[in-house]
Amino acid sequence: MTNIAQAKAQLDKILRKSRVHFYKPLQIAEILHRHRTKSAKFSLDDLNSYRTRSKSWRDEISKRLVGRSSTSSARFQDNLFEPNACPPAAIEALGKFNEKKGQIGAVEAYIYLMMRNKFNDIVEARNFLLVKGTKLNIEGFINLFERKPGLKRSVDKAYEICVYALFAAIVKLLKVELTMRYDSSNKQAIADFKEFISSVLGINGSDGEIHFPAQLHRVGVTNAADRGLDMFTNFGIAVQIKHMSLTEELAEDVIDSVTANDIVIVCKDAEEKIIKNVLSQVGLDQRIRGIITFKDLKRWYDIILSEQKYGAETARNLTQSLIQSFEDEFPATDQMLPFMKERGYDKIKLPKGWEI
């Protein structure tokens, strides 16, 4: 049997590890809320009675508070109930504590207050970008994520949006254009597959070629672990952004999960030599087109944002792209306070030992 101290320790571990969207803590809160209010009939010690249903309860609230729902695999989502996370015994202990007279809803309030605090950190980071504008110091922005407990788990995403905004701005500044063409001498194939050429390749006209701008794309907003592809392009390279040490095992994971022949790795300055050595040791360095360090990123940001070489418009384009990427990645909501009041969490006094 799990006591409340053990259950709280397990809950706190999940809270510390959670990213800004708070999916797993939110799921626990909604299980406790539905059980306390009897809005759904189930037993806290019977995982099968709420394992699947609780995902829809979580999604209902997450869509309201963060504007999206979890897209992680079912297996990853179910990790919430494993012994090293928050198993039914711990949830049952939290439920009993949550329904105890004099502290009704306290565990739910504790979780949502932690979520609100994390949202406050997000607002601070967003305001940092808005206030600094073209005077932005990219090092200061990253340091904000590394300093704030509520943002530290998302520092990899901060790196990603900084790299994406910068690379996209440089590609646009250089006016990089790609050309796709086919062999115009193969008359028979052209006649046989004219619809394919038009509909799939998008090539129309007699010259047999098409011109289009180079583009970069982030794989998507995700809570997945830091591995695999972070950005892809229409000019044949993949970008992997590392904010942690690259071990031999992780290096193999990175390469194996990316099918592109050319990979660019973005990393901290201190990691460059380590990464090169690891990739060389495992024979993967031939697939690496280049390694870009944070020092490179900072220098390129400073050049574009100085406005001296490329003007105010280019600088604004970069900062606007960065702000847009930030807003796409991190939830910005005005629903938290109304939700807290609606549930009555704003009036709950947290028990001793649960203070935030």
Image (cartoon, rainbow, N blue to C red):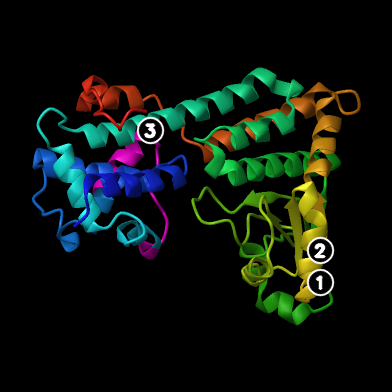
> Three-letter amino acid code at disc 1?
Ser
Question: Which residue is found at the position 83% from the left and 58% from the top?
Answer: 273
User: Total marks drawn?
Assistant: 3
User: What element does badge 3 sit on?
Assistant: helix
Callout 2 touching callout 1 (CB < 8 Å): yes
Give whichever of 182, 172 is nearer the camera.
Answer: 172
Q: Is residue 327 left or right of residue 236?
A: left
Mark 1 neighbour density, 10 Å: few (under 14) some (14–19) many (20 or more)? few
Q: Is residue 223 above or below residue 339?
A: below
Residue 272 falls within the magenta-colored stretch: no
Question: x, y percentage for residue 56?
Answer: 26, 50
User: What element does badge 1 sit on?
Assistant: helix
> Three-letter amino acid code at disc 3?
Met
Question: x, y percentage for residue 173?
Answer: 82, 38
User: What element does badge 2 sit on?
Assistant: helix
Can the viewer see residue 287 in this picture?
Answer: no
Q: Separation of disc 1 and disc 3 at Cα?
A: 44 Å
Q: Is residue 219 above or below residue 344?
A: below
Can the viewer see residue 85 in this picture?
Answer: yes
Mark 2 neighbour density, 10 Å: few (under 14) some (14–19) many (20 or more)? some
What residue would you read off at disc 2?
A: 276
Q: Which residues are magenta?
A: 57-75
Q: Separation of disc 2 and disc 1 at Cα?
A: 6 Å
What residue would you read off at disc 1?
A: 280
> Three-letter amino acid code at disc 2?
Lys
What residue would you read off at disc 3?
A: 114
